[in-house]
Image (cartoon, rainbow, N blue to C red):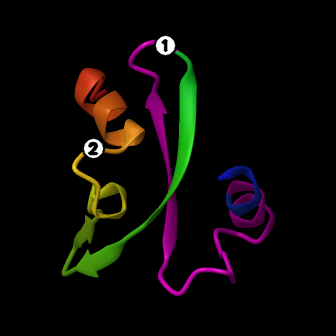
Amino acid sequence: MNEPVIAEFRGNGGKVKSRKHPVMLLTTTGARTGLPRVTPLNFSIDGDRLVVIASSGGSSRHPDWYRNLVADPV
């Protein structure tokens, strides 16, 4: 599901035309597998900070990338 967005991001110098907001690629280490995971995320800019919201579309469950980041924040 994310692969087309990742490919577009990488092929167009970080631009994704299908998204209204800017996109970043976050690479985390899978909490269970230890494998690298790449996730495209929308973000906002607040002064000199990037803001990402781990909402999983409003679900009560955190998104996988958030759990991976908590398990291995490096």
- The amino acid type, in three-letter code, at marker 2 is His
Q: Residue furthest front?
A: 60
* x, y percent for residue 18: 67, 81
> What residue is shown at x 50% (from left), y 61% (from top)?
24
Which range of residues does the magenta coloring cover?
6-34
Left or right, 42 with reference to 3: left
Q: Nearer the viewer, residue 12 or 21?
A: 21
Of callouts 2 and 1, the N-terminal one: 1
Q: In the shown orientation, is residue 61 left or right of residue 11?
A: left
Query: Residue 35 placed where, x, y %?
Result: 56, 18
Q: Quadrant of residue 50?
A: bottom left
Q: Is residue 48 magenta?
A: no
Secondary structure under the numbered disc 1 in the rendered image: loop
Amino acid on which the number 1 mark rests in the picture:
Gly
Q: Residue 62: which disc?
A: 2
Q: Residue at x 27, y 22 (%)?
A: 71
Q: CA distance from mark 2 to mark 1?
A: 19 Å
Could you tell whether 72 is left or right of 24 in the image? left
Position in image of residue 25 (x %, y %): 53, 53
Residue on which disc 1 sits: 34
For the point 32% across and 77% down, which residue is it? Answer: 44
* Residue drawn at point x = 66 percent, y = 75 percent: 16
Q: Residues within 10 Å of mark 2 (few under 14, many from 20)?
A: few
